[in-house]
Image (tube, rainbow, N blue to C red):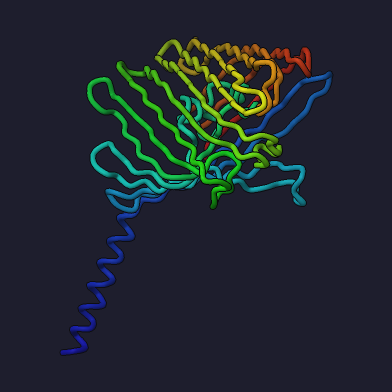
């Protein structure tokens, strides 16, 4: 009798644990792209990043998202490195309101909030210039709340408190915390309008983007965006005003903007244009001052949802590089 009871309890335990494990839904996806570039009278072949994207639903309340990137890094002994781009634990508070913990893409503009490292989803080959110029903090490690699709105008919000610039992934380097606050609305289908604010205090001596900061910097960022990806016309306009204050230089303003326009000529073919501009105020010490204007003209051919070919011409003028011309072809896939 006792043996039968033990068998029954073992079977019940097996059934419960098996049911729980079956209830968990985990997906692993990947993204990569290869490029061919013609610049300075030479042709170069290469690839950008290989992105490993993991999502897992543990229960109706808890989910996980992880994103790791494998990329070429000349300073590494193997010439490659692994970068943990996002580690997010999401707890559903109620309805469309969530508590988020971990490393996130700082929700300062549409691009950084919507696109991960899978370039198959980018409307252009590369990110706008403001990302390469490190105008905004791409990632934040901390704790926050978010909501989405609230009410008739589908109102959304993000509020996040993090370690701040100059900190490590697992510890803060000072007492100050970064604060990100963003709101947006989607009043009609395929249209999103948003604004955001970011505040941080960057300690003197902190290392940010491989550069030692020589002054204590109080940073404020204000961003605005309009995104409309319609069935025929695609429009994405974003601008960020950065205000960096030091006791030595006072407040200096930097404005980084871009405008993207695409027209769907057929179901698969989209000709597009993008204009970028970076303007720094004289005396700026936190950003690497290099006033730049860029013009991109391209074609995007969508073989399917996870296979896209793009061809671009880019003209760029900056204080340091003067004039440059580049032609790039890209084949991006998801798998």
As drawn, 96 above or below 101: above
Q: Residue at x 31, y 31 (%)?
A: 148
- Residue 58, image x, y percentages: 34, 53
State the image quarter where residue 273 is shown.
Answer: top right
Nearer to me, 268 or 84: 84
Q: Residue at x 76, y 42 (%)?
A: 74
**Extreme residue toward the left, this view:** 1
State the image quarter where residue 22 is shown.
Answer: bottom left
Nearer to me, 61 or 288: 288
- Residue 141, image x, y percentages: 49, 44
As drawn, 265 above or below 301: above
Nearer to me, 45 or 190: 190
As drawn, 10 above or below 65: below
Count every numbered label the image shows and give the total. 0
- In the rendered structure, the answer to whether residue 161 lies left or right of residue 326 reads left
Q: Residue at x 59, y 21 (%)?
A: 251
Q: Residue at x 19, y 85 (%)?
A: 4
Nearer to me, 233 or 252: 252
**Extreme residue toward the front, this view:** 247
As drawn, 166 above or below 23: above
The N terminus, quarter of image:
bottom left
- In the rendered structure, the answer to whether residue 195 lies left or right of residue 175 reads left
- Residue 264, image x, y percentages: 48, 12
Can the viewer see residue 243?
Answer: yes
Can the viewer see residue 53?
Answer: no
State the image quarter where residue 271 is shown.
Answer: top right
- Residue 6, image x, y percentages: 22, 83
């Amino acid at each position: 009798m006792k043996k039968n009871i033990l068998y029954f309890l073992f079977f019940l335990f097996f059934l419960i644990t098996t049911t729980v494990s079956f209830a968990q839904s985990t997906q692993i996806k990947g993204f990569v792209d290869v490029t061919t570039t013609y610049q300075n009278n030479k042709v170069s072949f290469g690839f950008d990043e290989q992105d490993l994207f993991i999502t897992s639903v543990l229960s109706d309340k808890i989910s996980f998202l992880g994103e790791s990137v494998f990329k070429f890094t000349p300073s590494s002994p193997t010439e490659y490195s692994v970068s943990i781009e996002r580690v997010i634990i999401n707890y559903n508070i109620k309805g469309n309101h969530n508590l988020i913990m971990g490393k996130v893409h700082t929700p300062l503009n549409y691009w950084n909030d919507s696109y991960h490292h899978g370039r198959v989803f980018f409307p252009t080959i590369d990110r706008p210039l403001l990302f390469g110029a490190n105008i905004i903090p791409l990632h934040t490690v901390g704790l926050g709340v978010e909501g989405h699709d609230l009410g008739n105008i589908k109102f959304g919000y993000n509020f996040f408190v993090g370690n701040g610039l100059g900190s490590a992934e697992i510890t803060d380097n000072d007492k100050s915390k970064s604060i990100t606050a963003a709101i947006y609305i989607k009043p009609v289908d395929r249209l999103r309008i948003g604004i955001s604010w970011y505040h941080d205090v960057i300690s003197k001596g902190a290392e940010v983007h491989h550069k030692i900061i020589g002054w204590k910097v109080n940073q404020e960022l204000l961003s605005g965006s309009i995104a409309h990806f319609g069935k025929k016309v695609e429009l994405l306009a974003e601008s960020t005003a950065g205000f960096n204050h030091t006791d030595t230089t006072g407040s200096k303003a930097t404005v980084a903007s871009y405008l993207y326009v695409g027209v769907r000529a057929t179901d698969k073919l989209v000709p597009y244009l993008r204009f970028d501009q970076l303007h720094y105020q004289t005396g700026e010490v936190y950003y690497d001052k290099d006033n730049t204007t860029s013009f991109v003209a391209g074609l995007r051919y969508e073989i399917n949802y996870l296979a896209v070919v793009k061809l671009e011409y880019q003209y760029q003028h900056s204080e340091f590089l003067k004039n440059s011309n580049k032609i790039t072809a890209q084949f991006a896939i998801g798998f």
